Amino acid sequence: MSLLLFVLSCLLFTGVFRKLSAASLRTSVRIPAATLLVFAMMLAALWVECTAWSASGVLVAAAISSCALPGQGLERLTVSLGRWRFSLYLLSIATLAALVFVYVPITTFLTSPGELSLHLDYLITVNSRNAMLVVYLAALVYAVAVIPRIRTALTVLALIALALGMVYSYFIPFGYPMMTGLTFEQVVIPAVSRILRIAADIVVVIAIVAAITAALVRWGGKPFVVATILINVSLIGVAAVGVLADSAGEAGGPDSSAQVSAQPLRFSKTNRNVLIVFLDRFMGSYVEDILRTDPDLNSSLSGFVWYPRTVSAGENSIAGVHPMYGGYDYTPTEMNARDRPLRDLSVEAFSILPYNFSRKNYDVNFVGPRGLGFTMAGDCKYLSMDRVNCTHIPLSIVKERAERAGFPLNELSRSSYADLLVLLASMRGASYLMKDILQMKGPWRPYMDHSAGTTFREWAELEAFPDLTYTGAGQPNLNIVSNILAHEPYYLNEQCVPQQERLRVTIEEIRRRGHDSLFSLQHSIGARCTLLSVARYLDFLKRAEVYDNTKIVIVSDHGIVGPVSDHSSRAVAGGTQHNEYVRTRSVLLVKEVGATGDVRISEAFMPNAEVPRIVCEEIGGCVNPYLGNKTIEAHGRDDPFYAAFVPWQFNAQNPKSFVIRSTKILKGQDPYDAQGWAYSE
């Protein structure tokens, strides 16, 4: 198919180039017209066969077809390039290859290589080799193209491709949502946005082609050679910073845990216990609808108080998880004021509760410390204390349930992960129209299968909580366990069972159910299934006779970023249905020891940063040993409350401070009141 596309491209370009040259058109018209033709043919080729070979074939066909240009053709460009032509060609190809294989993967997408089971030594070794192979093939094509105008065309096209790749990689917004698992979240792009993107592509492509050809004619090839060398130096420097920052996210997960107990959650029947269940990206307002549609939850959640007027310190885990574990001293704003390495402050936040409870003769079981030490999965080596057991849920639990359910868990090789990063880098540097084609036609299937496995893993881990629990401990226990099923609901059906294909519902049905998008419906289902599974675990604790003597907190670190509106009664009354408010709308439910009765609702303002203070009441209060034994109190509830919006990636922050893009201030202690929110100046 690639060969057929190449031949068709040659024939089409030859005919059109001749007609454009013969027509009485100005150069300022002919060049944009030819450029748009090549661009359109590349889009068509990628649509038919989405491979690098088809795209490269179109560019080579365009270079060969330049022979169809009558008269002087590309002579002015050939003269301007002079003896710098081959150097510029090779440098452009090498830089473009490095951009796709090395620079962009390290600086943009490789935010947590440990999470991908892939580390930089492997990435640099393998991808650098592949990049050099591209350079060798390009040099071979140049050597075979003995006609000067073809070599000139190859050089100009390579330079234009590099310029477009740089502009789209680093200067133009990516335009796609964050990834879930190993694929992009399925957020619908509005028609208006698509039209604007098409217009942007046309303007950017024509502008870059016109600017480069004019500059080559005026200044020749030497300045471009120097500029390309300088670009490489700067990109190498940025990548080096990424290599140094790779330790943020490099470790973590069950494979790197020092110890993996078969039953890491432990409870005493004769002493008081504390349990914190951390549910990533669980939007708090969902509780209203869940309690209405599943009234039996009132029995399973007996003794609980739901605090709907909660709020998080940010819209993602990196901003929300640290105050959730460490209190108000670990919001992004407060951490920035400390002027200390963020990794150290992250460890501090995760250490507050283990430090205090272990000193009060509690055994502490921290299971799945996501975010610990500025790592995605959480690195237990940073939490080494007496009486503290930091671990992860054993992978055997997931594998056993997968075998029983007949659910395939596709483990990707390191080479597959490296290929994924190259695919993502190609998408990052492509035009918007090419991005759309890559998303629709690209080789995503292996990564989609793996993402389905992510949903299954989180579901299986949550359902396995009873199997992971030992209820015969002698000492009091603090248990902290996390789960991200509410974050990864895309392969969960409405019966709360994982499946191998994404949930598919018509847009009419989605709107009938009161949702703005499939993304919104998926998260609603994920939240409901998550809470139902937690409720089943609570029923297990009742049967095991450790429920009444256990204080329990169910909490999330933030709300949802994406096309999700909040149609709950409080949001509608306060005018805060829009997603800008939903992003920080965390969940918080608390059960005191001995509490009974149906779920009660408290309208008190209760940010999730109150969790340390809430659980520390069990031991008479806590202190922060890193701040001169400062008492963990509720000072942060005083007006105003600050929510900082920072990049979600660990290595996108400064070493000693979060990159705060904007800050929202809440005054009046009512997160449902739109009048109380304002952006800081």
Image (cartoon, grey):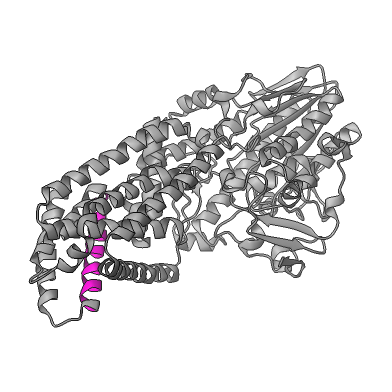
* 406 is higher (above) or lower (below) than 424: above
Which residue is more in the foreground, 674 or 434? Answer: 434
Let me know if residue 596 appears in the view.
no
Q: Main secondary structure of the magenta part?
A: helix
State which quarter of the image contains the C terminus.
Answer: bottom right
**x then y, percent, for residue 383:** 70, 27
**x then y, percent, for residue 228:** 36, 54
Which residue is more in the foreground, 538 or 149? Answer: 149
Q: Which residue does the image show at 65% across and 27% down from the upper left? A: 380
Which residue is more in the foreground, 338 or 670? Answer: 338
In the rendered structure, the answer to whether residue 645 lies left or right of residue 14 reads right
**x then y, percent, for residue 329:** 79, 45
Q: Which residue does the image show at 17% across and 60% down from the upper left? A: 62
Q: Residue furthest right?
A: 620
Q: Is residue 48 magenta?
A: yes
Let me know if residue 139 appears in the view.
yes
* 423 is higher (above) or lower (below) than 10: above
> Which range of residues does the magenta coloring cover?
29-51
